[in-house]
Amino acid sequence: MEKIADVQASATVDWSPLGDIYVKKTVHYHLSWDKNLDQCSVAIAPYGGPIALLQKLSKSGGDSKSILIYSQAGNPISSIPWEGGRLIGMGWNSNEDLICILEEGTMAAYSINGLLKYSRPVSREVREHRVLDCKFFHTMEGSGGFAVMTNCYQFFVVADTCRPRDEIRVKKVADLPSMTVRPNCWNVLTPQCNILVSVEEKLYILDQYEAIPQSVLTSKKDPSVYWAEIAVSVDGKAVALVDKGGYLWGGTSDFKTCETEMDLQSTAKVLAMEWGAKDFFVLVMEKLIFVKGFGKHWCKYPGKLGCCLQPEVDGLRLVSNTTSEFIHRVTSQSLAVLRIGSMEPGALLNDAFKEYEGDESHKADEYIRFIKDKLPDAILQCIKAAGEEFEPALQQSLLRAHKPRIISCGS
């Protein structure tokens, strides 16, 4: 069996400091498919669920004849013969049903096995004006829905797509002050299911009754900003904005607090932007994956082809042409035991085991004597840290740290 010191030697190498926290990017799967996601409509289910792909055949928006459904590992599950109209977007609900939104104003629900469960108009008004854009969202409670923008720039929200066909409820939010200019960008603010929308240099929150103008606290000399992308955290409490010139803003969703702002001094197009829990947000550009924390803190990873993001309650899932990865905050349990120089009881018990395996039992004895009164806490910390890690070898090494023969060294 591999020694604990060898297993844990690289445990913290891929930790990236982000102010008061660390983030880590973990590869969960090397995907077995041969797909170019840049040429597909992609829907990733939360909580490590399935992935749906519909390949685009032409720039005019034509789609292939089948929606393909894969596991998170890239293994095929089922397919849906696609004979409908132009697909505007698709997403998964908490029952792992695939919801497809068509340009004509129809929503269709399919099971994970590719069976049609129902098809219905979103609403009469949506059917009349047709769909221009749609966004899917999930809440901290596990429910999920979608919002659509029609060709006349009106917004409609379906808060829970798990309801039976005839119990689907559609909420229309207030109209924009001007209905003649297409919004730059928009997103859904949960849990109220309001719409946050940018039109030219103005920002509004649309609730059921009115369009409420928003002022963004910024250090820029010119406070009028043409926002190009909006991301909202899963809990709806944090918002990230970016303009076409690379200026980033992150703060509370009521815009009363600015947590971070930064000028990337780059005009590279932001292909996607999402929050990882509420600790950081991620921007995908052609050659770069940029992770922005609060304050002035940031880190970056090399870009990947076909990057698609799915926000999670505890991080961010990143699916590319070749891998399924998870970017997340390093938990307090892992920090306590694995961080270099930690004096927590669990860290010292872990060090004792490494010394014992390295035939340095006298050093192991010193560690155990030092934490003898806190052994229950040390054992519990190692168990909790093992539960937070993804690598089986690292989990096993942490669980082996409290073997009876190690603890007996200090007796």
Image: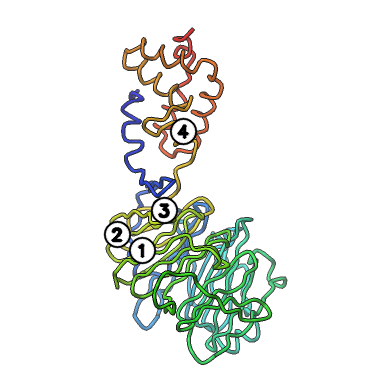
Label 2 packing within 10 angstroms: few (<14), some (14-19), many (20+):
some
Is residue 62 visible to the viewer in this orientation of the structure?
yes
Instruction: Tell me the residue at 51%/15% (across/down).
Output: 372
- Give the mark nearer the N terminus: 1 vs 4: 1
Within-10-Å neighbours for mark 3: few <14, some 14–19, many 20+: some
**Label placed on residue 284:** 1
Q: Nearer the viewer, residue 67 or 287?
A: 287
Can you give x and y, in whole percent of width and height, for residue 371 in the image?
A: 49, 18
Q: CA distance from mark 4 to mark 2?
A: 31 Å
Indicate the position of residue 286 as horizontal and vertical percent values.
Answer: 29, 66
Task: Tell whether label 1 touches label 2 (CB within 8 Å).
Answer: yes
Mark number for residue 336?
Answer: 4
- The alpha-carbon separation of the residues under discs 4 and 3 comes to 37 Å
Secondary structure beneath dot 3 equals: loop
Circles 4 and 2, Cβ within 8 Å, touching? The answer is no
Which amino acid type is marked by label 1? Val
How far from the left and from the top, in percent, is residue 385? 48, 33
Which residue shows up at 39% across the image and 46% down it?
24
Mark 2 lies on residue: 303
Q: Earlier in the sequence, mark 3 or mark 2?
A: 3
Indicate which label's residue lies in the foreground, 3 or 2. 2
Please say if 206 is above or below 73. below
- Say what amino acid the circle numbered 4 marks: Ala
* Residue 210 vertical position relative to residue 316 in the rendered view, above or below: below
The answer to whether residue 85 of the structure is visible from this angle is no
Whether pointer 4 and pointer 3 mark residues with C-beta atoms closer than 8 Å, the reply is no
Residue assigned mark 3: 75
